[in-house]
């Protein structure tokens, strides 16, 4: 069983977020779930989306992984709509699938974001930190990646941040390390 899964939450399966994931996962230590390939509807109070892919994805994640890394581009100063919908659906685990939701307690959460420049704003990380806290998860931290001016490659300074982040994910004693 692999301990870490990266949940890719971009509107483009092979875009910059995927490039960052591939760099982070260059040693193939992590599994990747691409939300673009899943049918996950918005949260509905009547749980009318109960038969889409959300619950099966969460069962797979909860049953097979200790650490969940959310990978998102920065869209309009926040996480992607794909990831926001996924986060909203966590409410399913607090309402009608409580037993499954309780299994998130004690697991780890982290986040990696990317944009064209090193311009992630303060506060971007707050939904991840607070969601982890609310769900009883350990928040390990985050990294932000950006690209060279021509957009063809991950910026060398961002590569350093991603390498540090990879080391944190590989570390057994998470309490001793946090990223920023």
Image (cartoon, rainbow, N blue to C red):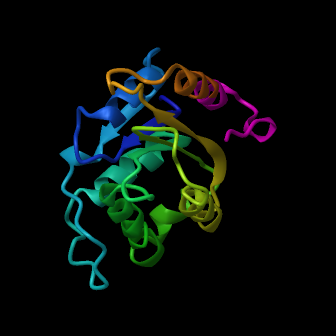
Viewer-proximal residue among 63 and 152:
152
Going by the image, does 119 lie left or right of 47? right
Residue 23 in view, yes or no: yes
Where 57 sits versus 28, above or below? below
Residue farthest to the right, as pictured? 176
Q: Quadrant of residue 19?
A: top left
Total marks shown come to: 0
Residue 25 in view, yes or no: no
Q: In which quarter of the image is residue 96?
A: bottom left
Residue 49 covered by magenta stretch: no
Q: Give the range drawn in magenta.
A: 165-180
Residue 171 image position (x, y, % from top left):
69, 27
State which quarter of the image contains the C terminus.
top right
Where 164 sits versus 27, above or below? below
Viewer-proximal residue among 63 and 93:
93
Q: In which quarter of the image is residue 160?
A: top right
Residue 113 image position (x, y, % from top left):
47, 43
Image point 46% across, 33% down: which residue?
146
Going by the image, does 44 lie left or right of 172? left
């Amino acid at each position: 069983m692999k301990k870490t899964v990266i949940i890719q939450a971009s509107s483009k399966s092979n875009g910059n977020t995927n490039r960052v994931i591939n760099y982070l996962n260059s040693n193939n230590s992590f599994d990747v779930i691409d939300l673009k390939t899943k049918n996950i509807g918005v949260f509905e109070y009547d749980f009318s989306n109960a038969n889409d892919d959300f619950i099966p994805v969460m069962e797979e994640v909860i049953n097979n992984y200790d650490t969940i890394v959310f990978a998102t581009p920065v869209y309009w100063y926040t996480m992607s709509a794909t990831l926001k919908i996924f986060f909203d659906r966590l409410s399913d685990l607090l309402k009608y699938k409580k037993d499954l939701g309780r299994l998130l307690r004690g697991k780890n959460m982290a986040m990696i974001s990317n944009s064209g420049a090193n311009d992630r704003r303060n506060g971007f990380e707050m939904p991840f930190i607070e969601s982890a806290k609310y769900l009883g998860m350990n928040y390990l931290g985050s990294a932000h990646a950006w690209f060279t001016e021509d957009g063809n490659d991950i910026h060398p300074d961002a590569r350093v941040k991603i390498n540090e982040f990879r080391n944190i994910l590989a570390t057994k004693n998470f309490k001793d390390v946090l990223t920023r």
